[in-house]
């Protein structure tokens, strides 16, 4: 049993979420890992980890998972809102269901799940929320219109949440990755769009490792509570846009 505080990570079955889980486990933290797929989370083999195979948009199920983890490990001190969905296409060709799902996963779930832990953090005057935005929340890219919209919203909501919670001593910060080697493109079916994205990534020597983003999250969290990185943009040095 660890004496470090509880860390909750959404989208923890792969990519940045899985890398963040490994980093915080190595640092001695108990974990609540949330994702739709249970087996990849089990395969991480991390000690002191509660696993919840739920969709982040199911707020009731997320709340129940948090309650179980807090009963076992104590109150949540860090929530990493990492779960995300990216489906690239021109708007004229966008799948309406995927348009809605991107906003539900990337934006609505982020707010609803933050709401589950913020009151306790405010009462304790201690805690951190890390929202995973994107460089696509800072500038526009071709065929990214819907995804851009969700990430611009994440950036705005993060700053709003930060201002709301500053007087409570609670940190809310944004990590905005550039190109990262993850499975995020799995929902992009358009051949030309996908080909162009991959060609650009190859031209800059590939994306960052998920572990690079995990290191940024862990470094920001390890700062004393009275110090907060409001926003961290992490991208390959060779990425020019």
Image: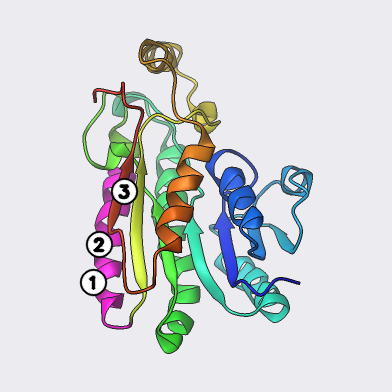
Is residue 101 visible in this depiction of the protein? no
Count numbered badges in the picture.
3
**Looking at the rendered structure, which numbered label has been put on residue 241?**
none
- Image position, residue 168 (x, y; %): 32, 83
Is residue 77 visible in this depiction of the protein? yes
Q: Which residue bears the numbered disc 3?
A: 232
The answer to whether residue 224 is left or right of residue 5 is left
Frontmost residue, 48 versus 113: 48
The answer to whether residue 55 is left or right of residue 47 is left
* SS label for mark 3: strand
* SS label for mark 2: helix
* SS label for mark 1: helix
Q: Which colour scheme is used?
A: rainbow
Residue at x 29%, y 60% (from the top left corner): 157
Q: From the viewer's perspective, is the residue at label 3 or at label 1 nearer?
A: 3
Q: Which residue bears the numbered disc 1?
A: 163
**Looking at the rendered structure, which numbered label has been put on residue 159?**
2
- Report how far apart the C-alphas of labels 3 and 1 lie in the structure: 17 Å
Mark toward the start of the polypeptide (3 vs 2): 2
Query: Few, some or many C-alpha atoms within 10 Å of disc 2 (few <14, some 14-19, many ≥20)?
Result: some
Q: In which quarter of the image is the C terminus?
A: top left
- Image position, residue 159 (x, y; %): 25, 62
Q: Marks 1 and 2: in contact by CB < 8 Å?
A: yes
Magenta part of the protein: which range?
149-168
User: Which picture quadrant has residue 223?
Assistant: bottom left
Query: Few, some or many C-alpha atoms within 10 Å of disc 3 (few <14, some 14-19, many ≥20)?
Result: some
Frontmost residue, 116 versus 231: 231
Residue at x 37%, y 25% (from the top left corner): 89
- Is 39 included in the stretch rendered in magenta? no
- Report how far apart the C-alphas of labels 2 and 1 lie in the structure: 6 Å
Q: Is residue 138 above or below residue 187?
A: below
């Amino acid at each position: 049993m660890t004496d470090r505080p509880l860390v909750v990570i959404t989208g923890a079955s792969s990519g940045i979420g899985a890398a963040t889980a490994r980093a915080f486990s190595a640092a001695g933290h108990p974990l609540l890992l949330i994702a739709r797929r249970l087996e990849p989370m089990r395969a991480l083999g991390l000690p002191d980890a509660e696993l919840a195979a739920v969709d982040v948009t199911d707020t009731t199920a997320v709340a129940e998972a948090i309650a179980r983890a807090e009963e076992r490990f104590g109150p949540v001190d860090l929530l990493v809102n990492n779960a995300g969905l990216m489906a690239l296409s021109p708007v004229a060709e966008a799948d309406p269901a995927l348009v809605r799902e991107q906003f539900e996963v990337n934006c609505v779930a982020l707010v609803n799940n933050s709401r589950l832990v913020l009151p306790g953090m405010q009462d304790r005057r201690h805690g951190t929320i890390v929202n995973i935005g994107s460089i696509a929340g800072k500038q526009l890219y071709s065929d990214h219109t819907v995804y851009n919209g969700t990430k611009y919203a994440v950036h705005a909501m993060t700053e709003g949440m930060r201002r709301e919670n500053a007087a409570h001593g609670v940190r809310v910060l944004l990590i905005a990755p550039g190109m990262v080697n993850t499975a995020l493109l799995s929902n992009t079916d358009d051949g030309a769009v996908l080909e162009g994205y991959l060609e650009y990534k190859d031209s800059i020597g590939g994306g960052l490792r998920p572990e690079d983003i995990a290191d940024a999250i862990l470094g920001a969290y390890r700062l004393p509570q009275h110090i907060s990185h409001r926003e961290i943009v992490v991208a390959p040095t060779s990425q020019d846009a």
